[in-house]
């Protein structure tokens, strides 16, 4: 009896660990750069300004608002600022977090792939996939918190955590893909 129980412990433990690791990630459609460019209404390079969280009583959700001062409007209507709205944030003692949602810091320089929500706000395309932080003349993506569904293979992929591309090379590739 004891050996039968011991044989079951390893598979059950493996199943629990697999389910637990999946529970900390959000699954989204895998997008490469051409997909991001094609799906975005707007692509901007800019600097993060004000960040604030507001409680939406009607939806019973916290939303974080991120204002970005646009330096280079690469796609879409020219704007001096864009306001991103995304689920999550902290209001009082209530904290909401969505795994894979991009995070922002005031003063951070970014390239963003955005969709217009037609209410004065935008959302980042593909969650973390649509945000590149600019650091020392590199565009850096961080895909933590997401699993990617690859429709070509039908499989889930865990992306490389960080991808660095020289900034001007990255911007040239974006402009080339928009032609």
Image: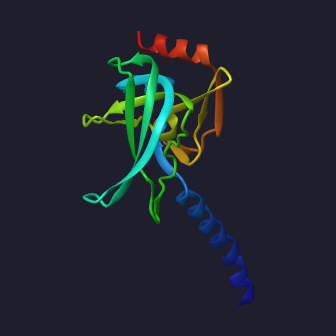
Residue 101 coordinates in the image, percent (x, y) = 49, 46
- In the rendered view of the protein, which quadrant contains the C terminus? top left
Residue located 53% across and 40% down the image: 104
* Structure colour scheme: rainbow
Residue 149 coordinates in the image, percent (x, y) = 49, 42
Front-lying residue, 47 or 119: 47
**As displayed, is residue 175 above or below residue 26?**
above
Q: Disc count in the image? A: 0
> Is residue 154 among the parts visible in the rendering?
yes
**As displayed, is residue 14 above or below residue 148?**
below
Residue located 48% across and 55% down the image: 97
- In the rendered view of the protein, which quadrant contains the N terminus? bottom right
Front-lying residue, 120 or 149: 120
> Is residue 130 among the parts visible in the rendering?
no
**As displayed, is residue 49 above or below residue 74?**
below
Horizontal side, residue 27 vs residue 170: left or right? left
Residue 134 coordinates in the image, percent (x, y) = 60, 26
Residue 162 coordinates in the image, percent (x, y) = 65, 36
Residue pushed farthest bottom?
1
Horizontal side, residue 135 vs residue 81: left or right? right
Residue located 50% across and 33% down the image: 48
């Amino acid at each position: 009896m004891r050996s039968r129980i011991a044989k079951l412990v390893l598979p059950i433990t493996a199943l629990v660990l697999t389910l637990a690791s999946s529970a900390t990630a959000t699954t989204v459609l895998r997008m490469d750069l051409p997909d991001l460019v094609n799906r975005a209404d707007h692509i901007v390079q800019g600097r993060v300004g004000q960040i604030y969280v507001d409680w939406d009583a009607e939806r019973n959700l916290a939303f974080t608002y991120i204002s970005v001062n646009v330096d280079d409007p690469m796609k879409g209507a020219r704007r001096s600022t864009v306001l991103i709205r995304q689920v999550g944030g902290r209001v009082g003692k209530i904290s909401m977090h969505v795994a894979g949602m991009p995070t922002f810091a005031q003063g951070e320089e970014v390239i963003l792939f955005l969709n217009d929500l037609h209410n004065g706000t935008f959302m980042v395309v593909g969650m973390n996939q649509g945000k590149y932080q600019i650091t020392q003349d590199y565009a850096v993506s961080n895909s933590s918190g997401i699993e990617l569904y690859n429709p070509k293979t039908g499989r889930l992929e865990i992306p490389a955590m960080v991808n660095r591309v020289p900034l001007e090379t990255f911007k040239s590739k974006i402009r080339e893909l928009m032609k």
